Image: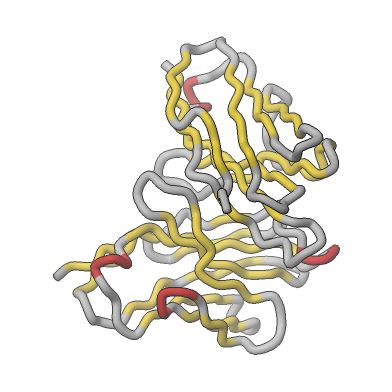
Amino acid sequence: DAGVTQSPTHLIKTRGQQVTLRCSPKSGHDTVSWYQQALGQGPQFIFQYYEEEERQRGNFPDRFSGHQFPNYSSELNVNALLLGDSALYLCASSFRGGTGELFFGEGSRLTVL
Amino acid sequence: AQSVTQLDSQVPVFEEAPVELRCNYSSSVSVYLFWYVQYPNQGLQLLLKYLSGSTLVKGINGFEAEFNKSQTSFHLRKPSVHISDTAEYFCAVSLANYGGSQGNLIFGKGTKLSVKP
């Protein structure tokens, strides 16, 4: 049973560019949440998707957007990259009808130069 | 708003010694509480959670935590640590509402546990 998979694992961008990160949830899960983990910090909630709609959003600017597809996979898009966007981006999936426990992927490490 | 404070950024301990990682939270409403572990270059793994019921919660790998509502604490303990427990540990809270959805977790800054031989 595959867990949560994320791609790419590492990427380097320059300021002003745009990036798309991808996430496939654990089998049987229908909800995807995204977190940003800056170096030396705990993860911060970006947003959550369920039934292809954004259901909850943390304190992140509109440059951060997402999408969920009918197969429950998800994308995180960040526009106009800033140096401060350098971080580990974690995807977590859950099943809304269950206990809601989150299962995390290994993350995508983004470096903005 | 909710917040989580992990009181120690680093905890060095010798193998087979007991350890306690401290976590305090702030919230005006009921919350669920969690401890996650993150090994180097990996995602987070759930160690244990408190949703309701018994305040002493047992998790994986021999860890346990006790929910103390009066002190708003949820400290993590293990009676005897191993080298393999070396990792970063995160305490987190979420609102106790609508079926326990855990999407919006608020994490502490983490405690790095270093187990020495």
Would residue B61 be found to the left or right of residue B116 on screen? right
Would residue B98 be found to the left or right of residue A112 on screen? right
Q: Residue B4 in the image: x percent, y percent?
A: 57, 61
Does residue B7 sit above or below B20 in this rendering?
above
Task: From the viewer's side, name the closer residue of A1 and B44.
Answer: A1
Residue at x 41%, y 72% (from the top left corner): B21
Q: Residue furthest left?
A: B117
Q: Residue A50 in the image: x percent, y percent?
A: 81, 44
Q: Residue A54 in the image: x percent, y percent?
A: 81, 38
The chosen color scheme is secondary structure
Residue at x 84%, y 37% (from the top left corner): A53
Badge count: 0
Does residue B37 sit above or below B22 in this rendering?
above
Q: Quadrant of residue B32 in the image? A: bottom right
In the rendered view of the protein, which quadrant contains the C terminus of chain A?
top left
Residue at x 47%, y 39% (from the top left corner): A38
Does residue B79 sit above or below B81 in this rendering?
below
Task: From the viewer's side, name the closer residue of A84 and A22.
Answer: A22
Q: Residue A95 in the image: x percent, y percent?
A: 74, 56
